[in-house]
Each structure stands twice: as C-alpha cells, then as structure tokens.
Image (cartoon, rainbow, N blue to C red):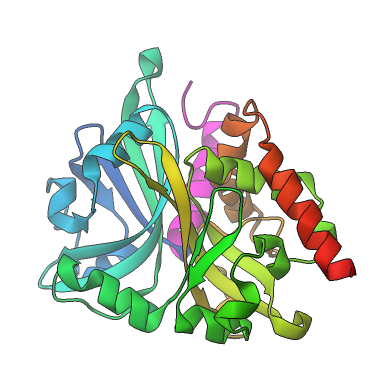
C-alpha cells in the first residue's frame, strides 16, 4: 500500500507543498541515496542548491546505528531521532522523523525525512564523539524504566521542570501530566508504543513543580540491549519559548497543539500513526500499577 493511499494526487501535492514550506524535507531512495531535499534542509547546511542529491545517506546524516534504523524502516515503521547533519562545509542538528514509503510487495520504496532545525538548541559539535557532551550541556535528559518510572535526570531537565532529582526519582512519568491526560487512552497508548520499541517526538505540554505548565520539544528514545529488546527510555528535551510556539516544529502531536494549516495537520497526524501499528500489543500490568500508585501518592 502506498504512502498516499486513500488521498487523491491533488491533495497529496498540496499537503507536501505545505509541509515543505515549514519543515526541512529530504527524500531518500531505498538504497539510502539522497534523491532530493528542499531549501529548508539545504539552509541548515548552507547549501544554495540541491548539491546533496546523489550522495549516500551516511555522508550527510551522522546516525549512530544506521543498520537498526534501516531495519525498522524496511518493516514500515516511522523512526524519530535527534540527528547531526553535515555537508557543504557546515553542520547542524535536526529533530527528524523518518517516514517509509512502501511499494509493491510491501517493500521499502523510499524514505521521506521531515525535520525541525534545532541547531541553536543543541549547538555545533566537531564530531560524533562530542555529541553526548553537547546534549548534556544544552538539553534536558531524563531516563525512564519501561513502565515509566523516573530513573535519573540531568540538571538541565530538572531546571525545566523545577524539581530536585530526589523529588522525582522513582516516581511515574504521569507526575508531569494532569490527571485527566494520565487516564486517557492516548497516554496509555503512548507508553505502550515506547515499550514496544517505537520512538516518539513532538511538542508536549508538561507540568513542572507546583503544576506550572511548560512546553517542551522532545524525543522519547527506546534503548535496546544486544538482542534488540528495549530496556529503558531516554528522553531529550528543550524548553520552547513563546516565540517558538508560534510555529510548531515537525512531529508535533496534532492533539497537543492547534495547527492552523490543515494540510500540515494531516501530515503530522500521519507521522503519528505508529499508534495504529502498536494497537495489537497487550498492555503491561506494570503501567497500570505504576499509574495507580502515583495517583495514590498524589491523593494522599
């Protein structure tokens, strides 16, 4: 089934055009060769024309585990990641969503990458070896167990939410959302997808200490063991300013932030359809238990 199945060609072109005006867009062949890129992506790298076409994916995208990425894409799964891009003597950072387009026989035909430029937040790094240092210095990082319990968080994340580490360690992620959201099917499905190994990225409304509302641009990244099984979730987050909220970046969940452009909203909804792929997974009792325990603590 094709990526645009169920939509007529005119609507597809209109939607892609609207998305291309707002976000960086790159199309890759099934073999990983760059087919095309729009001006927004080229501007991240300082390229005036599409001189990137024909280059191999890994010559531009500094991906830690390309093999794992392409296995997931070949299965038809979307993947979100914070990625460093290089080219034309310049480098930058994107919060990207890789969307596979399947062809005949349900085989990977191409991949469209939608990205938001987060170079200013992450800063430039000389090489991949500096990535963790750069992220630790400029972005909030928090780790969760698979059932959503806080394992640890860096000072940058604690500053965003206003808590000390000892106030959140061992508590459930639902501490950062209101009670209504924590009980919703969408929230339960969110953790179910993460547990199954799917990434999630977007603009999220969260509650800091004292129920102070904060908006963060974040990626939730499952970490896998040597056998490819998820073992924990690492979240990279940056607090968004009021100005930035006027133009939501790529992969913003449509239910979280109103999007004026209906065409863009349609595509963003499609980017979030990993939930549909995960709806057959059974809910782990640990999540319900953790949520119940958290509500008990809050109600005490």
Q: Horizontal and vertical percent for residue 139? A: 42, 77
Q: Is residue 11 visible?
A: no
Left or right: residue 151 compared with residue 283: left
Magenta stretch, residue numbers: 1-21
Q: Horizontal and vertical percent for residue 265? A: 63, 53
Left or right: residue 228 compared with residue 30: right
In the rendered image, residue 6 lying in the magenta stretch gets the answer yes
Residue at 16 percent of width and 74 percent of height: 90
Left or right: residue 87 compared with residue 35: left
Left or right: residue 58 compared with residue 236: left
Q: Horizontal and vertical percent for residue 27? A: 30, 45
Q: Quadrant of the C terminus?
A: bottom right
Main secondary-structure element of the magenta-colored stretch:
helix
Give whichever of 205, 284 is nearer the camera.
Answer: 284
Residue at 58 percent of width and 54 percent of height: 264
Q: Quadrant of residue 294?
A: bottom right
Q: Eyeballing the image, is 79 above or below 114?
A: above
Q: Which residue of the protein is positioned furthest toward the top in this rendering?
A: 105
Give whichever of 173, 167 is nearer the camera.
Answer: 167
Q: Is residue 2 visible?
A: yes
């Amino acid at each position: 089934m094709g990526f645009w199945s169920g939509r007529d060609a005119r609507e597809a072109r209109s939607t892609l055009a609207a998305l291309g005006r707002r976000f960086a867009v790159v199309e890759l062949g099934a073999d990983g060769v760059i087919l095309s890129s729009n001006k927004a992506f080229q501007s991240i790298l300082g390229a005036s024309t599409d001189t990137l076409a024909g280059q191999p994916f890994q010559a531009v995208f500094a991906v830690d585990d390309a093999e794992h990425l392409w296995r997931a894409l070949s299965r038809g799964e979307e993947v979100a990641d914070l990625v460093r891009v290089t080219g034309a003597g310049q480098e930058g950072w994107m919060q990207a969503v890789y969307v596979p387009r399947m062809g005949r026989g349900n085989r990977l035909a191409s991949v469209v990458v939608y990205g938001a430029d987060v170079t200013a937040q992450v800063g430039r790094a000389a090489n991949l070896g500096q990535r963790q240092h750069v992220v630790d210095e400029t972005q909030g990082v928090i780790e969760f167990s698979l059932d959503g319990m806080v394992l640890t968080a860096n000072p940058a994340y604690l500053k965003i939410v206003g808590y000390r580490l000892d106030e959140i360690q061992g508590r459930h992620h639902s501490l950062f959302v209101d009670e209504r959201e924590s009980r919703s099917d969408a929230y339960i499905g969110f953790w179910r997808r993460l547990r199954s190994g799917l990434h999630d990225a977007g603009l999220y409304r969260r509650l800091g200490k004292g129920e102070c509302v904060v908006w963060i641009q974040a990626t939730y990244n499952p970490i896998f063991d040597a056998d490819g099984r998820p073992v924990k979730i690492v979240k990279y987050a940056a607090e968004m300013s009021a100005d930035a909220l006027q133009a939501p970046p790529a992969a913003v969940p449509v239910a979280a932030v109103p999007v004026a452009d209906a065409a863009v909203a349609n595509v963003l909804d499609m980017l979030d359809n990993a939930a549909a792929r995960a709806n057959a997974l059974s809910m782990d009792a640990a999540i319900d238990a953790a949520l119940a325990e958290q509500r008990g603590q809050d109600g005490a």
